[in-house]
Amino acid sequence: MSGTNPNGTHYDDLVHWINYFNGGDAVHGFVRAAYGFSQSLGCAELPVVTAAEVFSHLAIGDLVTIGN
């Protein structure tokens, strides 16, 4: 997944099991030290194993609610 950060720098991150829900925003697997708080520019990041489990349960048009 690639794009531009708010500060103008670019990113190109390896993500897994991507389900887009709002333009470029997605539920996907991404390796992080911890989860459960804002760390992304709009995506809902999950541990890769969890993203693999939920991938087949999500479809275009599913409601995604993100909260802290």
Image (cartoon, grey):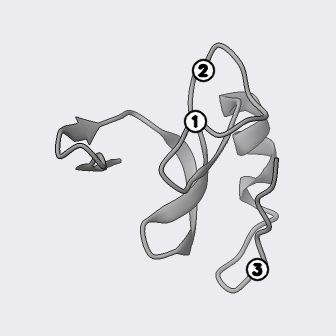
Please determine whether, in this image, residue 63 is positioned above or below residue 48. below
Q: Which residue carries the number 3 mark?
A: 62
- Residue 40 spot, x, y in % from top left: 53, 43
Q: What element carries label 2?
A: loop
Q: Which residue lies furthest to the top in this view?
A: 33
**In the visual, does 40 lie left or right of 24?**
right
Residue furthest to the front in view is: 7
Q: Position of residue 45 (x, y in %)?
A: 64, 42
Q: Which of marks 3 and 2 is nearer the N terminus?
A: 2
Amino acid at circle 1: Gln
The mark closer to the camera, 3 or 2, is: 2
Choose top left, top right, bottom left or bottom right for residue 57.
Answer: bottom right
Nearest to N terminus: mark 1 or mark 3: 1
**What amino acid is labelled 2 in the image?**
Arg
Image point 78% across, 78% down: which residue?
A: 63
- Say which residue label 2 marks: 32
Disc 1: which residue: 39
Tag nearer the camera, 1 or 3: 1
Going by the picture, which residue comes out furthest to the bottom?
61
Residue in the picture at 64% in, 81% down: 60
Identify residue type, mark 3: Asp
Res 65 quadrant in image: bottom right
Near-viewer residue (33 or 28): 33
Q: Do the residues labelled 1 and 2 touch (CB within 8 Å)?
A: yes
Circle 2 crowding by C-alpha within 10 Å: few under 14, some 14–19, many from 20: few
Q: Where is residue 33 in the image (x, y as percent from the top left)?
A: 64, 13
